[in-house]
């Protein structure tokens, strides 16, 4: 297997986009089926929510293993393992006869699906550096961002005509499509001569080395806190807009899609800006914009001065700005780790999951029937993203410049 000769291979980027879409598709297409599953198995929806939680835990926990596996055996081998698990568990969900079976299978599905996310980041790092990598991550966000717009609508349409089991048939078929494309069209980007034959045995020592990189930690913490903004929104928005402001399901779906569209468009603006600005210049400005919007959001969450629009408008810009932060923090975190890109990608994905899950838990724990829990957690995450970037990334860069100047 030879390394890809032409990094501008559009088919390769499309395949990577499909692989990164496994998570959003598997979550968002499944959401409309909660009521059907609750009725069929005669259990409360709270138990059905555990099936979603199992998938998310699988997605987060599984990433830590695929990185060293791909550094030792190659990206394609790791993808085949993950896709096999994803395909088998998806089709087995069709025959589930209890919530417990679905919880187990969704966990395995998450373990398989996260391979696509890890490998997509690793392949990009294999082929691109710095600003070029950030541009490709922006393209992947465009492809991945379509999923939250289309998936709930597709899931709702399926349920209006068929049963929830059809959703898993479609997810399994998407897995098969990805498997075929990887098999025939995605070339190996980690050739044998570059692999580490002891990557699995050295996994934890490699992770220790990665976390010693101040740049990795700085970009990780910045991206993690900004991802916390996104997870807080996903967790709290259904209550805020459907229960508090009494939007219908279709109106909420339209609003959800509009915010996803804003994120997609921002990620494409990011591609344009990268030809004129560095990733740090963009992150510095956009995290400030995100924080200003979060301030307005919290103010309206407490006072309700501007009602629905006082929440919807600043929230739109908070979510959209993520499309300009996340590709750049991802590229920055992986910049110094070309020799073990798989492990760095895996560690990044797992730790980002920890940040996101913490914000989700916070919104749930502080729920009190008001707008404050969601808006306050978003404000906190935005403030921390802004502060940590300046303290951990910009300050580190200034120290490096000063040290270099003193030596010269």
Image (cartoon, helix red, strand yellow):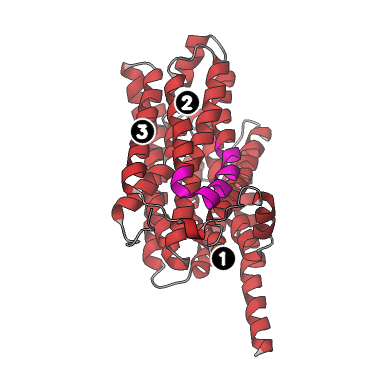
Say which residue appears at 37% left-offset and 38% top-offset: 179
Q: Quadrant of residue 295?
A: bottom right
- Considering only vertical position in the picture, is 74 above or below 324? above
**Residue 115, how many percent across, how many down?**
49, 42
Question: What residue would you read off at disc 2?
Answer: 89
Residues marked 1 and 3 touching at CB (< 8 Å): no
Q: Spatial distance from mark 1 to mark 3, Cα to Cα? A: 34 Å
What is the chief secondary structure element of the magenta stretch?
helix
Residue 308, above or below 126: above
**Image location of residue 331, percent across then percent down:** 50, 60
| Span colored in magenta | 59-77
Instruction: Let me know if residue 261 is in the magenta part.
Output: no
Give the class, few, some or many, for how many residues have Cα within 10 Å of label 1's Cα (few <14, many ≥20).
Answer: some
Q: Which residue is mark 1?
A: 336
Residue at position x 52%, y 24% in the image? 105
Q: Nearer the viewer, residue 53 or 321?
A: 53
Few, some or many residues within 10 Å of mark 2 (<14, 14–19, 20+): many
Name the N-terminal-most of marks 3 and 2: 2
Q: Secondary structure at mark 2?
A: helix
**Residue assigned mark 3:** 176
Judge whether residue 184 can be spotted in this image.
yes
In the rendered image, residue 344, in percent from the top left (x then y), is placed at: 58, 55
Task: State whether residue 87 is above or below residue 133.
Answer: above
Please provide percent x and percent y for residue 339: 55, 61
The first of marks 1 and 2 along the sequence is 2
Work out how far the residue at label 1 is from the one at label 2, CA to CA, in angstroms.
36 Å
Tag 3: Cα neighbours inside 10 Å, few (<14), some, or many (≥20)?
some
């Amino acid at each position: 297997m030879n390394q890809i000769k032409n990094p501008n291979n559009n088919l390769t980027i499309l395949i990577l986009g499909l692989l990164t879409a496994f998570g959003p598709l598997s979550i968002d297409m499944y959401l409309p089926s909660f009521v059907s599953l609750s009725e069929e198995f005669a259990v409360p929806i709270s138990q059905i929510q555990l099936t979603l939680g199992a998938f998310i835990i699988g997605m987060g926990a599984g990433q830590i293993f695929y990185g060293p596996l791909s550094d030792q055996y190659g990206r394609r081998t790791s993808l085949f393992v993950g896709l096999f698990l994803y395909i088998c568990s998806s089709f087995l969900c069709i025959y589930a006869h209890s919530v417990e079976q679905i919880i187990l299978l969704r966990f395995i599905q998450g373990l398989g699906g996260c391979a696509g996310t890890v490998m997509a980041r690793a392949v990009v790092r294999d082929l691109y550096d710095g600003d070029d990598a950030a541009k490709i991550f922006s393209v992947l966000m465009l492809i991945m961002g379509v999923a939250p717009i289309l998936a709930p609508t597709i899931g709702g349409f399926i349920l209006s005509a068929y049963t929830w089991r059809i959703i898993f048939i479609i997810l399994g078929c998407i897995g098969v499509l990805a498997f075929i494309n990887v098999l025939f069209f995605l070339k190996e980007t980690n050739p044998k001569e570059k692999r580490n034959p002891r990557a699995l045995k050295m996994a934890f020592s490699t992770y220790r080395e990665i976390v010693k990189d101040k740049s990795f930690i700085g970009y990780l913490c910045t991206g993690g806190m900004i991802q916390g903004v996104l997870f807080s929104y996903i967790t709290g928005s259904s209550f805020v807009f459907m229960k508090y402001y009494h939007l219908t399901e279709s109106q909420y779906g339209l609003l959800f899609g509009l915010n996803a569209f804003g994120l997609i468009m921002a990620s494409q603006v990011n591609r344009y800006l990268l030809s004129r600005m560095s990733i740090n210049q963009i992150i510095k400005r956009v995290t400030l914009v995100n924080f200003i919007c979060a301030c307005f959001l919290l103010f309206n969450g407490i006072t309700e001065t501007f009602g629905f629009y006082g929440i919807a408008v600043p929230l739109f810009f908070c979510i959209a700005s993520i499309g300009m932060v996340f590709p750049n923090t991802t590229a920055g975190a992986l910049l110094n780790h070309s020799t073990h890109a798989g492990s760095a990608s895996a560690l990044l994905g797992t730790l980002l999951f920890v940040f996101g899950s913490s914000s989700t838990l916070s919104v749930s724990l502080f729920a009190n029937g008001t707008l404050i829990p969601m808006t306050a957690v978003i404000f906190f995450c935005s403030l921390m993203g802004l502060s940590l970037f300046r303290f951990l990334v910009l300050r580190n860069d200034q120290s490096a410049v000063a040290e270099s100047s003193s030596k010269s």
